[in-house]
């Protein structure tokens, strides 16, 4: 056993993990996913915003948003500096983007390793040394059977990489549960060679954490809302709805049926901006008639409800049309939060398998606003697991545990009807009781979710350090034996 190996075998948890990048600009690393273009170089060199020139620009920020927050655990290195027999831990991060069909990244002989021109010697290190791949797709929650199968086939069957070396970072907060169910269903052995590491990361949280800690790139500093417990808001509810989804349509119809539209700040399109042929009426026509909630027969909507709501459209709150400003809403809509009592958050997923927490759920935390979430079961639990508080002492939150989507929405409807019956005195009592929760959530939002994720990645790699020493070098690095 040579001296180099002796020094590595004494690795301790205090040692840093290398984060390898193939390409660098003057101000930092460029993403590994594909070869850089002139827009990427200009962004790194001059600080310009290439999004003004190209909607398809994508620059890696994993080092900034995640690894750099743990400089005691990670160090950045050029891929070319890693020696072919280096046994020290390293991770090669890939940022994935929604603009490319997910399974294209794992397409046979033309997948992400080939497209990024990863050198063969490093693929060898992934197999036999302490090197890992991090796939970052935390802005999305892709966890379908087809997507999980494509990753398994590509890394395990095509490249023979031990699957524990693959870390998949997803926006699905129940990602590990979904993955294990898929693996069990497909008889994937529960061992390190066959199962990858799933890391759930609601990355939208850090959009607002960054704002609260350092303001925006344009120099705009955060404005802390004042929650006035002596003010009865002019509206009961606030709900933002840009794209058609079935649960959003049902919420709009529910508010219409309960005569609450005029007591709600509600945005709702007449047709989809991306496709003007997709209208509210055409989407309603696709729903089952009579309009029953997923087979739950306690709540139905009449054609009169549908027609009355349709005639109101489009419903506009602030008139903003820039999608980036909608998602990264830094107090721009604070006035609407202060003039309403409760947010009705229609999360991206409601009856899908993946439970999501997107920017929709974090904006009320930024604006100190109570909320009800129309989302997948466990969405409130996900927030509590992150350290936030919800409102189970103030209204019924049992809907978060109901699997049937129709029954879940009916349970939410009961709470909405109850709030609608509150007197001004009851509203002020509620505001006094809810304020400590809102203050706690605002302060908790200042904490970066990426700090927790960075430690999870570090722990996964260091926990498998000895496993990663899959082979032991002999004197001439000619014979190898299992470690």
Image (tube, rainbow, N blue to C red):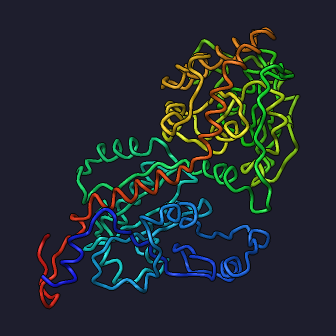
The answer to whether 310 is drawn above or below residue 76 in the figure is: above
Measured from the top left, where is residue 465 in percent x and y?
Answer: 26, 64
Quadrant the C terminus occupies: bottom left
Left or right, 214 with respect to 406, comes to right
Measured from the top left, where is residue 453 in percent x and y?
Answer: 46, 53
Quadrant the N terminus occupies: bottom left
The answer to whether 120 is drawn above or below residue 294 in the figure is: below
Outermost residue to the bottom: 476
- Residue drawn at x 81%, y 42% is 271
Front residue of 224/240: it is 224
Measured from the top left, where is residue 331 in percent x and y?
Answer: 79, 44
Left or right, 314 with respect to 193, comes to right
Q: Say how many tags the image has.
A: 0
- Residue drawn at x 43%, y 51% is 199
- Residue drawn at x 72%, y 49% is 327
Front residue of 360/190: it is 360
Left or right, 101 with respect to 75, comes to right
- Residue drawn at x 58%, y 69% is 60
The answer to whether 30 is drawn above or below residue 449 in the figure is: below
The answer to whether 199 is drawn above or below residue 56 in the figure is: above
Measured from the top left, where is residue 109 in percent x and y?
Answer: 41, 75
């Amino acid at each position: 056993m040579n001296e180099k190996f002796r020094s590595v075998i004494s690795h301790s948890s205090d040692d840093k993990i290398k984060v390898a990048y193939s390409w660098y600009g003057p101000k930092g690393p460029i993403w590994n996913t594909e070869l850089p273009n002139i827009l990427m170089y200009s962004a790194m060199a001059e600080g310009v915003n290439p999004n003004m020139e190209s909607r398809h620009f994508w620059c890696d920020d994993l080092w900034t948003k995640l690894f750099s927050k743990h400089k005691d655990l990670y160090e950045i290195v050029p891929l070319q500096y890693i020696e072919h027999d280096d046994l020290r831990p390293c991770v090669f991060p890939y940022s994935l983007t929604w603009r490319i069909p997910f399974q294209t990244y794992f397409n046979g002989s033309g997948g992400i390793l080939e497209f990024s021109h990863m050198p063969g010697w490093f693929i060898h290190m992934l197999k036999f040394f302490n090197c890992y791949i991090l796939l970052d797709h935390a802005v999305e929650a892709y966890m379908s059977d087809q997507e999980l199968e494509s990753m398994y086939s590509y890394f395990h069957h095509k490249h023979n990489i031990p699957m524990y070396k693959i870390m998949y970072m997803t926006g699905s907060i129940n990602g590990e549960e979904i993955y294990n169910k898929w693996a069990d269903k497909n008889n994937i052995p529960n061992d390190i060679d066959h199962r990858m590491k799933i890391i759930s990361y609601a990355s939208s949280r850090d959009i607002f954490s960054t704002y609260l800690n350092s303001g925006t790139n344009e120099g705009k500093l955060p404005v802390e809302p004042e929650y006035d417990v002596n003010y009865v808001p002019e509206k009961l509810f606030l709900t933002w709805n840009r794209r058609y989804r079935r649960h959003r349509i049902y919420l709009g119809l529910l508010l219409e049926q309960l005569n609450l539209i005029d007591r709600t700040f509600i945005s709702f399109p007449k047709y989809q901006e991306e496709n003007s042929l997709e209208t509210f009426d055409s989407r309603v026509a696709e729903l089952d008639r009579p309009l029953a909630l997923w087979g739950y027969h306690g709540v139905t909507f009449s054609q009169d409800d549908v027609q009355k709501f349709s005639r109101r459209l489009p419903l506009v709150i602030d008139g903003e049309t820039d999608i980036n400003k909608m998602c990264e809403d830094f107090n721009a809509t604070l006035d609407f939060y202060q003039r309403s009592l409760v947010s009705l958050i229609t999360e991206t997923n409601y009856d899908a398998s993946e439970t999501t927490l997107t920017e929709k759920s974090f904006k009320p935390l930024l604006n100190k606003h109570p909320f009800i979430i129309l989302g997948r079961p466990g969405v409130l639990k996900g927030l509590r697991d992150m350290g936030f508080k919800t409102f189970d002492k103030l209204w019924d939150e049992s809907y978060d545990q109901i699997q049937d989507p129709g029954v879940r929405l009916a349970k939410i409807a009961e709470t909405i009807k109850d709030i609608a019956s509150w007197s001004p005195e009851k509203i002020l009592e509620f505001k006094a009781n809810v304020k400590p929760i809102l203050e706690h959530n605002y302060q908790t939002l200042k904490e970066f979710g990426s700090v927790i994720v960075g430690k999870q990645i570090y722990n996964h790699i260091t926990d498998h350090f000895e496993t990663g020493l899959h082979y032991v070098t002999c004197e001439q690095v000619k014979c190898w034996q299992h470690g």
